Image (spheres, rainbow, N blue to C red):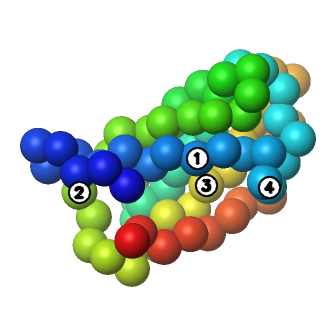
Amino acid sequence: NIEKEGQVEIIGWLYQYYNIEPKAKVFAKIGKKTYKATASAKGKFTIKVKKVKKGTKIKVYVKDTAGNTSKTVTVKAK
């Protein structure tokens, strides 16, 4: 996580969880708010969100170009 002007970036590499295709949409849900990004060909992504407290649960999932949705992975903000 990188803090900058009240924002945090969720940076990840999805191959550790999924074998995703290029251009898959990555979603991060914090509370009731959902943020999204598009994964690179190598499964990397960055999602900018408002600053959250340490320990906040962030639910991350992927939707591929065919519309299939992955299982949700829950991580905690550091």
Kind of residue indicated by mark 3:
Val
Q: Which residue is mark 1?
A: 12
Q: Earlier in the sequence, mark 1 or mark 2?
A: 1
Q: Is residue 34 above or below residue 20?
A: below
Mark 2 lies on a secondary structure that is: loop
Q: Earlier in the sequence, mark 1 or mark 4?
A: 1
Q: Is residue 43 left or right of residue 77?
A: right
Q: Which residue is mark 4?
A: 17
Kind of residue indicated by mark 2:
Lys
Residue at the spot x=37%, y=45% of the render? 9
Residue at the spot x=39%, y=71% of the render? 78
Query: Residue 73: where, in percent of width, then height?
Result: 69, 64
Kind of residue indicated by mark 4:
Tyr
Q: Crowdedness of circle 1 by 10 Å Cα count: few (<14), some, many (20+)?
A: some
Query: Residue 29: where, in percent of width, then height?
Result: 49, 55
Q: Is residue 9 above or below residue 54?
A: above
**Label 3, label 1: how far apart the Cα atoms are:** 10 Å
**Label 3, label 2: how far apart the Cα atoms are:** 17 Å
Kind of residue indicated by mark 1:
Gly
What's the mark number on residue 51? 2
- Look at discs 3 and 1 and give the one toward the viewer: 1
